[in-house]
Image (spheres, rainbow, N blue to C red):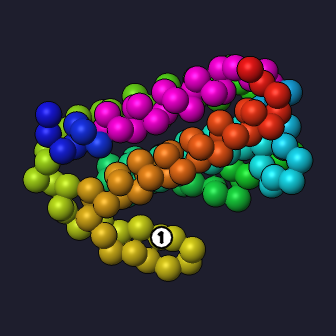
Amino acid sequence: MGETARLAKHLDDLRRAVVEVVQAMDDAQLNTRPTGLANSPGILLRHLLGSERYWVHQVVGGEDVRRDREAEFDPSVPVRKEELLRSVEEVARRTHEILDGLEDERLQDAAEARVGGRTLQLQKGDAILRAVEHWAYHSGQLRLMRRLLGVG
């Protein structure tokens, strides 16, 4: 297995773990912020999808995803479980199309990303790694949220 395939597998495994957490919740739970936390589980997953679209689809794949990061965190837009899970499948499918077509040697290709109002110069492999790290980071938060919400 090549390096690109290994990174894609890590993304798949992390996505799958998050989906397991989300599948145990209903729409109301997905839209509930546990006491003391700023976001609901649904908002966090919406944010993860926006982030993967940005780092993999745009930075690596060259697509203009027109990410609206602030909208990802908007609590006035309720999250629906069915739509969220469908979005996970769509993002995963597109990520696979991009990464399946990316040869390992291209992981070192230069890429550019906008983060916090500044421009980063990095390699495509670094952008994929950012997506992997982001899923891993929030995966733990989502498991904690599930427990705080009393979901089995």
Give above or below for 123 relative to 53.
below
Q: Residue at the spot x=56%, y=32% of the render?
A: 18
Q: Quadrant of residue 102?
A: top left
Q: Nearer the viewer, residue 18 or 127?
A: 18
Q: Nearer the viewer, residue 61 or 3?
A: 3
Residue 25 falls left or right of residue 59 = right
Q: Across the whole image, how many numbered discs are drawn on residues?
A: 1
Q: Secondary structure at mark 1?
A: strand
Q: Residues within 10 Å of mark 1 (few under 14, many from 20)?
A: few
Quadrant for the N terminus, please: top left
Provide residue 74's location: percent of width, then percent of height.
79, 51
Q: Quadrant of residue 84?
A: top right
Give above or below for 43 relative to 120.
above
- Specify the amino acid type for callout 1: Arg
Q: Residue at the spot x=41%, y=57% of the render?
A: 130
Q: Residue at the spot x=34%, y=52% of the render?
A: 128
User: Which residue lies under the disc numbered 1?
Assistant: 114
* Prevailing secondary structure of the magenta residues: helix
In the rendered image, is residue 31 in sight? no
**Range drawn in magenta:** 8-27
